[in-house]
Amino acid sequence: HCMPLSTFFVGPGKTRRSLCELVTGVRIPVPGPDHVAHFYKHGTRPALDISTISIGIAGTMKEGALSNVRVAFGAVAPTPVRAAQTEKALEGRKLDAAIIDQAAATARDEVKPIDDVRATAWYRKEMIHNITKRILGHVAQA
């Protein structure tokens, strides 16, 4: 059966897949010509380790403004999370320095990470802020 990705993850390392089920595919709509997407993963050895944080940002870029914005964070909650407030801070707005600063601050305040062996909550929040700002800067210049 099919289910939205937003309901698939239920806890750290846990999904709705039962022991007798196998994920056989993921359906992703083909993006339009103005689609932009950036992903960032940070860890001590990013290719091999569990992330300290990960960030995905996507949307449609027209005339310097983002629409249909999607922002997701990993390793800042028990499951991957969509960042609704950060998306709202970006939706329909031109990516100038003030909007990028506002969205990065919203992202930092939106996440509620924990302290663990990989990083402190404070460090994760600062990384979310700084990397969100960097990614949006790249999107604005693209």
Image (cartoon, rainbow, N blue to C red):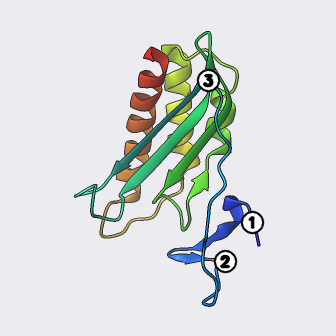
- Which residue has dot 3 on it? 33
Rendered position, 113 above or below 93: below
Dot 3 alpha-carbon crowd within 10 angstroms: few under 14, some 14 to 19, many 20 or more: few
Image quadrant containing the C terminus: top left
Instruction: Tell me residue 124's x, y (percent).
Output: 39, 52
Give, as a three-letter code, the residue at label 2: Arg
Residue sticking out furthest to the bottom: 20
Instruction: Tell me residue 84's x, y (percent).
Output: 68, 43
Instruction: Tell me residue 128's x, y (percent).
Output: 43, 43
Residue sticking out furthest to the left: 45
- Which residue has dot 2 on it? 16
Say whether disc 1 or disc 2 marks the residue closer to the N-terminus: 1
- In the visual, does 35 lie left or right of 105? right
Give, as a three-letter code, the residue at label 1: Met
Residue located 65% across and 39% down the image? 30
- Which residue has dot 1 on it? 3
Rendered position, 21 above or below 78: below
Q: Which mark is residue 88?
A: none
Rendered position, 44 above or below 141: below
Dot 1 alpha-carbon crowd within 10 angstroms: few under 14, some 14 to 19, many 20 or more: few
Residue sticking out furthest to the front: 24
- In the visual, does 118 lie left or right of 87? left
Nearer the observer: mark 2 or 3; the answer is: 3
Decide: marks 2, 3 in contact (CB < 8 A)? no
Q: Spatial distance from mark 2 to mark 3, Cα to Cα?
A: 34 Å
Image quadrant containing the N terminus: bottom right
Name the element at disc 1: loop
- In the visual, does 102 lie left or right of 29? left
